[in-house]
Image: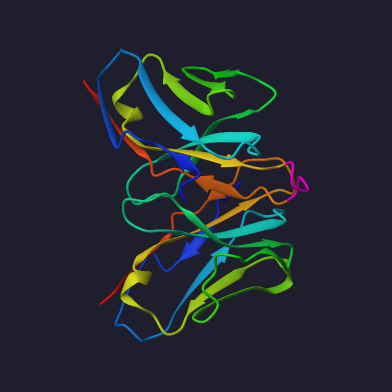
């Protein structure tokens, strides 16, 4: 049973336009969500996070939106740049459980290609 | 700060052989994780250590996989005997205690033939 789902395996956008990556989750106990970016032959790199008490978090060109009722989050990249081309993983955690385990459940990833 | 170090970067073995991976976390990070990423899937947690104690190993195939974290710093993950389905990238990650993102190493790509 996949608790975190990224239904779009790939996405292609033009440089300068907006990239929107989507993620759905099924476990209502998740209260902390993260996006990681992964280049080939490298480990995932933390990008941005959001806790369930917020519905939006912004960091420069990256904004994450959380819709708890729909169990949906999205990552917006504006404007998109060729260097943003990578695999993006959505991850979720249930920190309410003791607050110390920080166990992340990952989605399957979306390959973003930003065309110059 | 120095990142999470892993070695080797690549390993090719035959099925039924054994293999070991090494991880050195970021200095001062109390929590260490081993993840398995099979091609086309997201990383899956195998085991989590808090200092040198195991917090979660519910998804570790204990009949063939073992892990230890000596003195609460470095960690090794071992597979014995390996199966074809163990072919994957093994990622080590660390984090300070509590509510914080994980920092990943570059992983070890294992191919079992």
Please give the name of the residue rendered at 78% of the width and 48% of the height, measured from the top-left corner.
A98
Task: Determine which quarter of the picture holds residue B26.
Answer: bottom right
Q: How many marks?
A: 0
Please give the name of the residue rendered at 50% of the width and 44% of the height, measured from the top-left corner.
A3
x and y percent of residue A69 in the render?
A: 58, 23
Please give the name of the residue rendered at 52% of the width and 82% of the height, measured from the top-left corner.
B63
Instruction: Kindly give the residue lying farthest to the right in the view shown.
Output: A98
Instruction: Kindly give the residue lying farthest to the left in the view shown.
Output: A116
x and y percent of residue B11 in the render?
A: 34, 72
Task: Determine which quarter of the picture holds residue B4.
Answer: bottom right
- Residue B4 drawn above or below residue B100: below
- Residue B6 drawn above or below residue A58: below
| Magenta-drawn segment | A96-100
- Residue A2 drawn above or below residue B52: above
Color theme of the render: rainbow
Q: Nearer the viewer, residue A2 or B14?
A: A2
Q: Nearer the viewer, residue A8 or A87?
A: A8
Q: Main secondary structure of the magenta part?
A: loop
- Residue B32 drawn above or below residue A45: below
Pick the quarter of the image with the C terminus of chain B: bottom left
x and y percent of residue A81 in the render?
A: 32, 21
Determine whether, in the image, residue A45 is placed left or right of residue A108: right
Determine whether, in the image, residue A20 is placed left or right of residue B67: left
The verdict on residue A115 being magenta is no
x and y percent of residue B33 in the render?
A: 59, 59
């Amino acid at each position: 049973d996949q608790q975190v789902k990224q239904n779009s395996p790939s996405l292609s956008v033009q440089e300068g336009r907006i990239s929107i990556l989507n993620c759905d989750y099924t476990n209502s106990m998740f209260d902390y969500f993260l996006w990681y970016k992964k280049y080939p032959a490298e480990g995932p790199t933390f990008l941005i996070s959001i806790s369930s008490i917020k519905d939006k978090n912004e960091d420069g060109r990256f904004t994450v939106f959380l819709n708890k009722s729909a169990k949906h989050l999205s990552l917006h990249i504006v404007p998109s740049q060729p260097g943003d081309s990578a695999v993006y993983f959505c991850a979720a955690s249930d920190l309410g459980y003791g607050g110390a385990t920080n166990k992340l459940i990952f989605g399957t990833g979306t390959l973003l290609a930003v065309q110059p | 700060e120095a990142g999470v170090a892993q070695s080797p970067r690549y390993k090719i073995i035959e099925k039924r052989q054994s293999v070991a991976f090494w991880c050195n976390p970021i200095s001062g990070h109390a929590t260490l994780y081993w993840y398995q990423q099979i091609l086309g899937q997201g990383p899956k947690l195998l085991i989590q250590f808090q200092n040198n104690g195991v917090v979660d190993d519910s998804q570790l195939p204990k009949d063939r996989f073992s892990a230890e974290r000596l003195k609460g710093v470095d960690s090794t993950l071992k597979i014995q005997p390996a199966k074809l389905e163990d072919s994957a990238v093994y990622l080590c990650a660390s984090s300070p205690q509590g509510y914080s993102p994980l920092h990943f190493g570059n992983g070890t790509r294992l191919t079992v033939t």
